[in-house]
Amino acid sequence: MDVSGASGQPRSGDDEPTQHPASPTAPATGHSGPEPHDTPTPPPPADEPHDTPGPAPADTHPENRPGSDEDSPADTPDTPAAPPHPAPRPTGTAPAAPGPAKNRPPRRRRESGGGMLMGRPFGVPVYVAPSWFLVAALITWVFGGQLDRVLPELGAARYLVALFFAVAFYASVLIHELAHTVAALRFELPVRRIQLQFFGGVSEIEKEAETPGREFVLAFVGPLLSLVLAGLFYLAMLPVAPGTVPGVLLAGLMISNLIVAAFNLLPGLPLDGGRMLRAVVWKISGKPMTGTIAAAWVGRALAVTVLIGLPLLTQSGALGTTAEDNVGMDTVTDALLAAILAAIIWTGAGNSLRMARLREHLPELRARTLTRRAVPVETHTPLSEALRRANAAGARALVVVDADGNPLSLVREAAIVGVPEHRRPWVTVSGLAQDLTDGMRVSAELAGEDLLDALRATPATEYLVVEDTGEIYGVLSAADVERAFVKAMARPTPSSP
């Protein structure tokens, strides 16, 4: 799943989270979660909290002030937060974990928080989440019980065989995810990481495919690889005697990969089949949002079907068991599994809608309109004098420059508020400033996802905004970008359901 969901295409993945989620026994896999694949999410918070008002009354460049209050940064000092950044969209082999459910910008998870690093195939880090060990234990227990009926002579050794099956199954899940990753890299879409977790795998792809054709291919390659693996396990099983350990293992892996492929081909977000349906509707309508809405609602209908239909199928004996066998704890287990799968699919579909809506509003995030007016001050200027100049100019930021007017550093808002008023005549601005790095200089022409990418690359509380000529345009506060990001998330679109 794609990290827009699980084994198909995010996080997104709308994320979005996640930002960019298969089933335990003959583990099914699905594609769930936010649409992280190609969905924007805010960048990691800066090291220094930005939580103090600016040096002067709120204002933006008058000639570039946004046309409405909704599009402009707050007119009064506000608590700055971390700048937004594009979120990955999950492509998981199984339903990924549900993404953020509220209209707030998802924060990028640090790589180190992804679990145990297992390697970097194709340069993409692969992590095993702690929850994987729980599902591996569950698969070992369930499959070991099945082996006790088929190969009773194994005794306690059946659990070692079952553990090998669990590891081999998740290796096939990883291959499923690598198929999404290789396709994404082929289309020049950055992949943040692959994570193996409780309900399968997630490939966090950070950008959306540019065409419906690429979207379809990106989603389809995962289930296709699972079908190929099922075929290979079947061919390997032919010369092996049935009723032996190798025969049982190969049969189990063949069936598991068929389940993974079939589950992920279901036509609803956040599964791979949902992303394929989205691509088809996108191609027909010419509107990616229309495709997302159609596939998300099919995904929600699918969630209800799984919630009600899976327990009924089990009780009816349609899955190969008799009604007498499906009583007591088995009934509760089936209902619980159906509820978990349904919740993952429903949540992932909702996240896909939210992330798609956010992408529609991304172009409204423009560095030029969010930038605060700034006044240049020299290194040894007292803070009180610098603030007086800022107030006189209607500016909200201070840029420390050298004798030739070249910018050296930015005075931090948080540092200004920490200086008592009676001490400000004796404190110079250089003591409150953060030295500029190349990543803290952004072009005034940046907008949308390009702007978020630039801020995510260098987390900070303030950025120097410059014209193409190198002239200082102003200072961009991470807090202002955060507020604009949240407003974009909350604002409905005409095409939203």
Image (cartoon, helix red, strand yellow):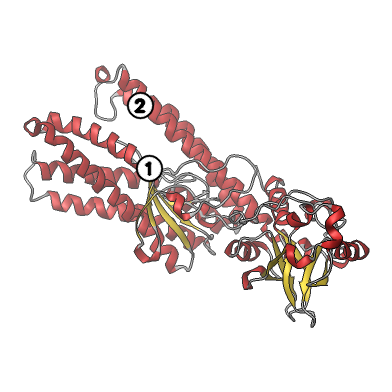
- Residue 75 lies, with reference to residue 342, above or below; the image says below
Residue holding disc 2:
334
Helix, strand or loop at label 1? It is helix
Q: Is residue 98 left or right of residue 194?
A: right
Amino acid identity at mark 2: Asp
Residue at 17 percent across and 39 percent down: it is 160
Q: Is residue 91 visible?
A: no
Classify 10 Å Cα crowding around label 1: few (below 14), some (14-19), many (20 and above): some
Identify the mark nearer the N-term, 1 or 2: 1
**Amino acid type, mark 1:** Pro
Q: Nearer the viewer, residue 272 or 457?
A: 457
Q: Quadrant of residue 460?
A: bottom right
Q: Which residue is mark 1?
A: 130
Q: Position of residue 474 (x, y in %)?
A: 78, 68
Q: Residue furthest right?
A: 392
446 sits left or right of 236 in the view: right
Q: Circle 2: is it few (<14), some (14-19), or many (20+) Cα within 10 Å?
A: some
The disc label shown at residue 147, or none = none
Q: Say which quadrant the C terminus sits in.
A: top right
Position of residue 262 measured from the top left corner of the image (x, y, whole percent) = 34, 44
